[in-house]
Image (spheres, rainbow, N blue to C red):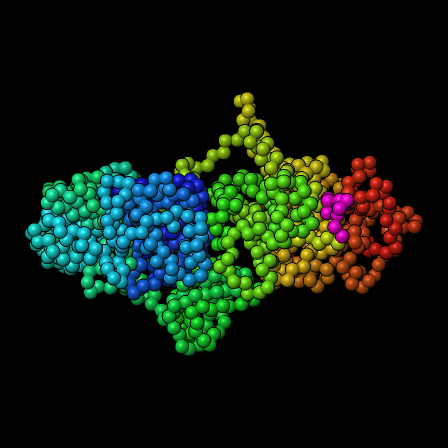
């Protein structure tokens, strides 16, 4: 226990904990997501859960900006509604073999974890050293009681998920509530909280009832105006001297009855504050710690600290509506606790109560609770694919509306219910698009509930502390924290992805070592926990598929990298029970708080490029086997996994194409290129990847894509196809094509439009504007552009697209051509758009298109079958393009 300007995040060691439960009254989205979340994730904590005062949460939603849970998502935020205020401040972290417990006074805000003068008590548990097991048992009992009332997915996340991966919780000793417990330190400690049967005040009095109290010191930013707690202390211990430490920016007991028993001190003269100011550039630090220190005649000392202010509500004096609070009571036989904290009250610094200026403050009731008391309390809103599940408290006897709001906090959809239930399920139209908030209203559009953020059930499911996914999620966390090069370490997981147990996975699997063989079942491996999800349809396989796909996870990371920097405009915080100032003193990037500076060497860069080209080579070999291998499947249709792996390829081409890094070697500066814009056709450059990987995938797509039954999976495939369409076009146009290669460029663009786009003119024209927007947005994200990009883009719009429309028109009219000449590009199913290298009088065609096998003799993509002897194709009808 020490009162020093130290951020408690620094106590969390790397890869020691997988889960945490945090409690707070006030909350700062920006601080939590940019600082706490990044730090926790960099340490390997994945299952992150926050209990917040429900009224404060409701007030935050009144000020919603659309940026909540956008900077760093993947945590659960659950409102706790009580008659008064939910006010405890607990951090409890859980690992496989150890735990960390921190109890104190700071909220999950900038000031609560950086600038304010807070007090914390921290305890560590290890299965090899269990001295602190009793205090962990008390804290876990409290949090378990809290979690038992939780609805929705967070109930699983704060109970079973943790218990299954922290088995030591089951071995903690049974303890009685509020009793003194032995710890690894010399002092004993009691875990106190307000409950229906007792209170922090009552338990404190029980523990000191047989003591002869000679001095009491109270330190708090908030007292009640009449000083009722102070008066009670005076009445109970009339012979004790009472020191009252105040800070003018808080609430002072300005209307209390004065007595010689009381001595008043200003926090800024309490000793510790001056020391801390000298260590910090921030002179605006405010007192937010809460302490009651008690000395006995025989030298024994007690120190109560935690979340409870020196108020009747905080300590739960008889007859008062108590806050939910947690405090620790330390008992020291030798004393000296205030000295250890650095708090020294000198007689010369005494002040009169009248010397303090009373600051006018509105009560929490007036500013928070009163404005957010609704007839119905929304507790959780979880999107499970296309179904929204809402858990509620309260009652409403009339018809009401369920209302959705978008990220700009604008209303855009509602649905009427005639009967109120504690759990509502809403089937949503897939065309609704994205939404972020939900709230209930009566038929006159008057709100009858608090507003709530909608959480994605399956996104949170990926935070499950499964050891099998620990490495993947750790890499993901490092990437989110700025280590973008780490994405190359994720490619391995996409390579070995067997999510869909199809021929493609089988072929790719044959290249791996025996320790990664399939177990023979047809279900996706259960990498993330879905046991609490009750399927509403019979397509459980396809639902598990979307969650279990490693390729989709890698694709998410790549999309995160290429996306523009997120807006970090900070919302105005609600300054209740805290004083918000600057952002604290940690950066949130890494555990050592040093900004990431890559120490580049040729060996490192070469290793990174090897990972990149290894992914390309593996995909190329897989596609070639599916198209031309001896055991190639008949009528194979690319799966969602195939489509995802292809999209990963496009993202890598767009991210690393033309990317260079500087490195020093032998006192000279050199340049290293990951994926150059060169003219050979290998998979180690942009052009080769386009010709081989894009060409082969468009060849695979000739038969269409695998058909799925589940609507959400169908929607996902269409979404990925739309991404593939725009990204493929951008990859092709961001290239330098020589005159002798333009037929590759034209044929691949036409096949992209045909197999990833639309089959008739009306659909093409109706969607063309959206396609242009996607292309332009993706081009604006490019970090490296070729000189010919603008010209290629114009060629696409004004030559390729008109030619494609002409072919679609002729196909619709069944108006086929019978004659073609060398140098034309023709369309003929099932080979798609191909370049005519030669044709004779009886229409024997030698066609060229990326996706055909490469012929080493003729040095071109002309082998449309794996036969050793090439046979031209005799075509009686086809459609000629204008290219």
Residues in magenta, as a range: 624-634
Q: Is residue 161 above or below residue 686?
A: below
> Which percent across, then down, holds residue 157?
44, 54
Q: Image quadrant for the N terminus?
A: top left
User: From the viewer's perspective, is 45 left or right of 697?
Assistant: left
- Residue at 32%, 63% (x, y): give it: 82
Tell me which corner region of the image, top left, top right, bottom left or bottom right, holds residue 838: top right
Q: Is residue 457 above or below residue 518?
A: below
Does residue 555 show up magenta in the picture? no
> Which percent across, then down, holds residue 159?
41, 55
- Residue at 76%, 52% (x, y): give it: 634
User: From the viewer's perspective, is 165 left or right of 667?
Assistant: left
> Which percent across, then down, holds residue 732?
68, 46
- Whether residue 341 is visible: yes
Q: Nearer the viewer, residue 835 or 136?
A: 136
Q: Is residue 290 above or below residue 455?
A: above
């Amino acid at each position: 226990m020490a009162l020093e300007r130290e951020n408690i995040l620094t106590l969390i060691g790397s890869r020691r904990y997988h889960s945490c439960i945090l409690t707070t009254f006030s909350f700062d989205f920006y601080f939590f997501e940019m600082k706490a979340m990044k730090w926790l994730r960099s340490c390997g904590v994945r299952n992150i859960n926050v209990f917040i005062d429900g009224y404060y949460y409701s007030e935050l939603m009144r000020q919603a900006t659309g940026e909540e849970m956008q900077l760093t998502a993947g945590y659960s935020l659950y409102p706790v509604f009580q008659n008064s205020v939910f006010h405890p401040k607990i951090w409890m972290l859980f690992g496989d073999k150890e735990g960390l417990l921190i109890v104190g006074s700071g909220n999950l805000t900038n000031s609560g974890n950086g600038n304010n003068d807070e007090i914390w008590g921290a305890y560590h548990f290890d299965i090899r050293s269990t001295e602190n097991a009793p205090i962990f048992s008390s804290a876990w009992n409290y949090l378990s009681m809290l979690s038992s009332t939780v609805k929705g997915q967070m109930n699983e996340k704060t109970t079973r998920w943790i218990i299954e991966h922290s088995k030591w919780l089951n071995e903690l000793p049974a303890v009685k509530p509020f009793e003194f417990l032995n710890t690894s330190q010399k002092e004993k400690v009691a875990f106190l909280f307000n409950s229906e049967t007792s209170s922090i005040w009552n338990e404190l009095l029980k523990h000191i009832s047989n003591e002869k109290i000679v001095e009491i010191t109270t330190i708090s930013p908030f007292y009640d105006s009449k000083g009722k707690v102070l008066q009670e202390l005076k009445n109970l211990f009339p012979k004790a001297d009472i020191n009252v430490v105040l800070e003018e920016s808080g609430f002072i007991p300005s209307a209390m009855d004065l007595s010689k028993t009381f001595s008043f001190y200003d926090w800024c003269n309490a000793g510790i504050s001056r020391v801390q100011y000298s260590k910090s550039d921030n002179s605006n630090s405010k007192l937010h710690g809460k302490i009651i220190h008690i000395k006995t005649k025989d030298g024994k000392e007690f120190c109560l600290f935690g979340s409870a202010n020196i108020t009747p509500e905080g300590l739960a004096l008889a007859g008062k509506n108590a806050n939910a609070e947690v405090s620790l009571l330390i008992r020291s036989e030798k004393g000296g606790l205030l000295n250890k904290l650095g708090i020294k009250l000198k007689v010369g610094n005494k002040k009169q109560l009248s010397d303090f200026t009373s600051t006018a403050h509105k009560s929490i009731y007036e500013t928070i609770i009163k404005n957010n008391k609704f007839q119905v309390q929304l507790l959780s809103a979880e999107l499970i694919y296309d179904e929204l599940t809402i858990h509620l408290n309260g009652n409403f006897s009339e018809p009401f509306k369920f209302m959705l709001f978008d990220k700009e906090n604008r209303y855009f959809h509602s649905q009427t219910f005639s009967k109120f239930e504690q759990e509502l399920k809403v089937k949503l139209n897939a065309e609704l698009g994205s939404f972020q908030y939900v709230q209930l209203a009566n038929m006159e559009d008057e709100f009858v509930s608090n507003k709530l953020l909608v959480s994605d059930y399956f996104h949170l499911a990926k935070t499950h502390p499964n050891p099998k996914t620990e490495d993947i999620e750790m890499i993901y966390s490092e990437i989110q924290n700025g280590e973008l090069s780490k994405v190359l370490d994720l490619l391995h997981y996409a390579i070995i992805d067997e999510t869909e147990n199809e021929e493609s996975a089988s072929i790719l699997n044959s290249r791996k070592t025996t320790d990664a063989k399939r177990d023979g079942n047809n279900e996706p491996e259960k990498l993330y926990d879905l046991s609490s999800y009750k399927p509403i349809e019979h397509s459980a396989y396809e639902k598990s598929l979307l969650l279990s796909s490693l390729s989709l996870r890698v694709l998410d990371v790549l999309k995160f990298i290429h996306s523009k920097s997120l807006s970090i405009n900070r919302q105005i915080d609600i300054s209740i029970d805290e004083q918000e100032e600057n952002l604290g003193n940690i950066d949130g990037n890494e555990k050592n708080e040093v900004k990431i500076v890559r120490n580049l060497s040729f060996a490192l860069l070469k290793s990174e490029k090897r990972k990149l080209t290894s992914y390309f080579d593996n995909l190329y070999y897989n596609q070639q086997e599916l198209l031309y291998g001896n055991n190639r499947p008949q009528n194979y249709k690319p799966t969602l996994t195939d489509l995802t792996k292809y999209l990963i390829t496009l993202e890598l081409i767009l991210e690393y194409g033309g990317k260079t890094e500087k490195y020093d070697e032998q006192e000279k500066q050199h340049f290293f290129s990951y994926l150059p814009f060169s003219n050979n056709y290998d998979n180690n450059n942009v052009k080769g990847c386009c010709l081989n990987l894009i060409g082969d995938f468009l060849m695979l797509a000739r038969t269409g894509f695998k058909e799925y039954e589940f609507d959400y999976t169908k929607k996902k495939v269409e979404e990925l196809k739309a991404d593939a369409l725009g990204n493929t076009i951008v990859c092709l146009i961001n290239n330098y094509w020589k005159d002798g290669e333009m037929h590759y460029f034209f044929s691949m663009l036409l096949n992209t439009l045909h197999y990833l786009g639309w089959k008739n003119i009306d659909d093409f024209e109706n969607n063309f504007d959206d396609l242009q927007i996607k292309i332009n947005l993706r081009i604006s994200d490019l970090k490296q552009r070729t000189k010919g990009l603008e010209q290629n883009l114009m060629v696409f719009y004004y030559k390729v697209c008109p030619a494609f429309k002409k072919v679609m028109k002729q196909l619709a009219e069944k108006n086929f051509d019978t004659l073609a000449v060398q140098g034309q590009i023709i369309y003929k199913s099932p080979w798609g758009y191909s370049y005519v290298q030669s044709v004779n009088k009886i229409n024997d065609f030698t066609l060229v298109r990326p996706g055909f096998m490469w012929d080493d003799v003729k040095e071109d993509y002309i082998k449309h079958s794996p036969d050793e002897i090439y046979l031209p194709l005799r075509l009686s009808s086809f459609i000629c393009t204008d290219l």
